[in-house]
Amino acid sequence: MQSSSLVKQDAIVVKHAKYSPVREFWRAFKKQKAALVASIFIVLLIVIAFVGPYIVPYDPFEPDYNAILQTPSAKHLAGTDEYGRDIFSRLIVGSKISLTVSFSAVFLGLILGTILGLISGYFGGWIDKIIMRTCDVLFSFPDLLLAIAIVAILGPGINNVIIAVMVFSIPSFARLVRGATLNAKENVYVEAAKSMGASHVRIMYKHIFPETISELIIFVTMRVGTAILAASSLSFLGLGASPEMPEWGVMLSSGRDYLGTATHVVLMPGIAIFLTVLAFNLIGDGLRDVLDPKIKNN
Amino acid sequence: MNENVLEVINLETIFKRDQQEIKILRGVNFSIQRGEVLGLVGESGSGKSITSLSIMKLFHGTSGEIKNGSISFHGTDLTKLDEASMRQLRGKKISMIFQEPMTSLNPVLKIGKQLTESIEMHMKLTRKQSTAHAIKTLKSVGIGRAEELMNEYPHQLSGGMRQRVMIAMAMACEPELLIADEPTTALDVTIQAQILELMKQLKEKNDTAILLITHDLGVVAEMCDRVVVMYAGQVVEEADVFELFANPKHPYTKGLINSVPKIGDRKEVLDSIPGNVPSPQNMPQGCKFAPRCSNAMEKCHEHEPEIETITESHFCSCWLYASKEVALHAK
Amino acid sequence: MQNKLLQVKNLKKQFQVAGGMFEKKEFVNAVIDVSFEIKEGTTFSLVGESGCGKSTTGRLITRLIDPTSGSITLNGNEVGYLKQSELGDLRETVQMIFQDPYASLNPRMKVKEIIEEPLIIHTKLSKGERENLVLEMLNIVGLNTEYANRYAHEFSGGQRQRIGIARALITKPKLIIADEPVSALDVSIQSQILNLLKKLQQEYQLSYLFISHDLSVVEHISNEIGVMYLGSIVEIATKEALFVNPLHPYTKALIASVPVADPLLRRKKETLKGDIPNPKNPPTGCTFHTRCPIAQELCKLEVPKMRQITEQQSVACHFVEKIEEV
């Protein structure tokens, strides 16, 4: 028996525009002007990183002993370094290294940290204690010191820089996700899923992880900035990229001998690092205003 | 004839969202006399709580604003008062009790401090006198261990106790008007019965006018002298409480009364009102109840009915009782 | 004679509220001693005030939490101590409807995804088969099938509760545990949902464990009722017996406290004095003695046993007979 009266009751459809989370996000994000400009900058940087090697005006590795330490001019937009290599070309090629290193390190840290955070927050008890105390131990070292120690053990090189930056990212991600998980698991719909017989993995993946996404997105953008800075610092100290590579930190390091005579050799890679890190932080701030539920409600 | 303590005339309150004005109250009219309990009944979204906030002008933190109409309290139009003069009235002449006492008690201050503060401010008493007065008020709401309680924090009390303290705070300065917004909804039935009984006693003693906002028709029947039924930001019916339950006119009021299960009433299927309350952004044209109304006629969907006098103390806004016809122009 | 679908015997649940490795442990008895049974196709209600343990009992039966002692038998099989991995059967036959229709549906999921989730967990149906069942379910609970692709937060409380009911029914369960399913809804919507629950019960021979604080709703929907106070059932009776002739002084007070929606029946209430005691520190003997109008010395000392008074009615009070004389 199909009750027609009940069906009819809902015939009064409340009409409103179809809701879409993506559209909603974009509508709010458009209002964040600084973040919008920063995003355009980062998108351009990513494009340049990929097509850069094909469009650079000079070979970034080719020395030109007739044009050593030239200041910026129409010919060399960012001047030349101590071997006469075009700094502008080196910066463009170097952006690929900086972005790859930071993105892959943060991405790996994100995956491992999220899994650990979910497990820790969801199950609680001794599992939680072990994971969180381990994170505390990692937290007790300053980020860079920890990275230096890791590279010192593994030996210098780009891949080891990625591992080092990843390792010091894990505890931050784990702690963030654990906090969000503790909140999310109190939701009645999580209990509802349990009462339906959903497995732990399903509950974590379907009902808890989505609750952490907005906080993760904000944190990832901030973290990429930190990672770029850390990778450059390691290279600056000679623990990362090899000296002939056009990595921004390496360029900074090799230019410091000429700080008194040719400031631009240090200034140019410095500005590149500064702008990129700033852009990621601005995006992170903008995303926070849009996505963070604690701020959204005000 | 008794004097009106409060007279609300054509009150319109709006909220702003994304540069849009959303009308929550669309012309509310009612009055309360001295020593009278007026019930304001409606479902969520009917605007009953916004009415109380408008009277108190408690919009801080929201975009609410009184757009039109007047609220006259002993002849003073509250809509024209500034915040400082409102503050003089609040807690002294007009008090309010909320549904969730915890949200209106400060968790880090002792009960005694919270009580004496407003007494000192409004009644111009010394510290010692106001403490004595606070203890007297607590005793009057049936709290035996009043002296001890003065030194306790809100979280140490049970829900019923907190609501008693709230009532004590509200009654401390012997207000002329008490606005009680769902005062017993968060409480258990046996505690609710205690609190309702207490409110009745206090009213008898001080001749306070009470505006009782509730969705519970049982509480209305138990407490009120007169009832105002609200739907979608308007008053749809107003009547003496006995008249309203015996002879409801508006189809919404009828539906509301019939959909409550009553103890001892062996109905197999409950009457219910189909559909849902319309949202303020999507108000239907004409009578706002028409889409859910089983008596809806063509004109109901086109024109809003005016409030009609049924008897001297019974008013209803519905085309079924209209005294004049309206021309229909089919579009 | 109808079959007994669920039997609960001497169920007890103790929560640890304080203490740890180095401190003294403290416990609260949320459920002290609860026994009842539900026959196929009928509704058993647990009614009581906050902190009486009615919701905890519901969560024990669905095994969201583990009982401390006592037994829960479903279709004759003990399920109280099965491991979570062995609960497949129970999870399919017993489903829950929750109080808060806003919190119990995941706001990030579409209506379709919410309703089909039990199918994904318990069956191997294809996507198309699941979708058909979801649309059928939407029809049954009186929702427009076009709603399937919308998000749950776009709906009003009543519509959301219908979605919750659709989710509970899709695996064709035998027993529905409804924890205050209408108390968050407006009265006009409340009656829609109560009618729907009754209709579904008749069509699908469902049994309900209905948990509520609202006596008038309970009277409307139940066949049998258990009245709980501080973790124990104090009276258990058929609906007719309980409302016509309540025996336990607490039941009497509870029924008398409900405001009646008729001003002609307005009366001075004989209200119960005092507050509900803190469950952490319950009174000795009969837990109700601190508020009971007829309490005697014996009540402070001895916990009253559940006694069958008539075929329809059992009560745990030392002085039932005395009340009847008064």
Image: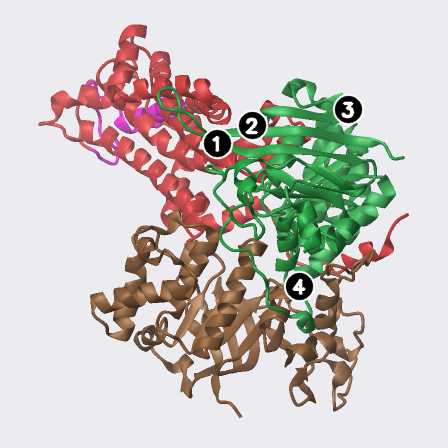
Chain colours: A red, B brown, C green
Question: Residue at label 1?
Answer: A181
- Cα separation, mark 1 vs mark 4, equals 35 Å
Q: Nearer the viewer, mark 1 or mark 3?
A: 1
The answer to the question of whether label 1 and label 3 lie on touching residues, with beta carbons closer than 8 A, is no
Q: Secondary structure at mark 1?
A: helix
- Cα separation, mark 1 vs mark 3, equals 29 Å
Residue C119 seen in this snapshot: no
Q: Residues within 10 Å of mark 2 (few under 14, many from 20)?
A: many
- Cα separation, mark 2 vs mark 4, equals 36 Å
Where does the image place residue A298, in percent across and percent down from the top left? 41, 54
- Cα separation, mark 4 vs mark 3, equals 40 Å
Q: Quadrant of residue C173?
A: top right
What range of the chain is rendered magenta? A72-101
- Tell me: C124 left or right of B145: right
Question: Residue at label 2?
Answer: A204
Where does the image place residue A184, in percent across and percent down from the top left? 51, 36
Q: Residues within 10 Å of mark 1 (few under 14, many from 20)?
A: many
Whether the magenta-drawn stretch holds residue A96 is answered as: yes
Where does the image place residue A228, in percent across and percent down from the top left? 32, 26
The answer to the question of whether label 1 and label 2 lie on touching residues, with beta carbons closer than 8 A, is yes
- Cα separation, mark 1 vs mark 2, equals 9 Å
The answer to the question of whether label 1 and label 4 lie on touching residues, with beta carbons closer than 8 A, is no
Question: Residue at label 4?
Answer: B277
Q: Secondary structure at mark 3?
A: loop
Question: Residue at label 3?
Answer: C124
Q: What label sits on residue C176 in the rendered view? A: none
Which amino acid, by three-letter code, is at mark 2?
Answer: Met
Say if A164 sits above or below B164 in the image: above
Where does the image place residue A12, in percent across and percent down from the top left? 75, 61
Residue pictured at 25% horizontal, 69% vertical: B120
Residue pictured at 23% horizontal, 14% vertical: A238
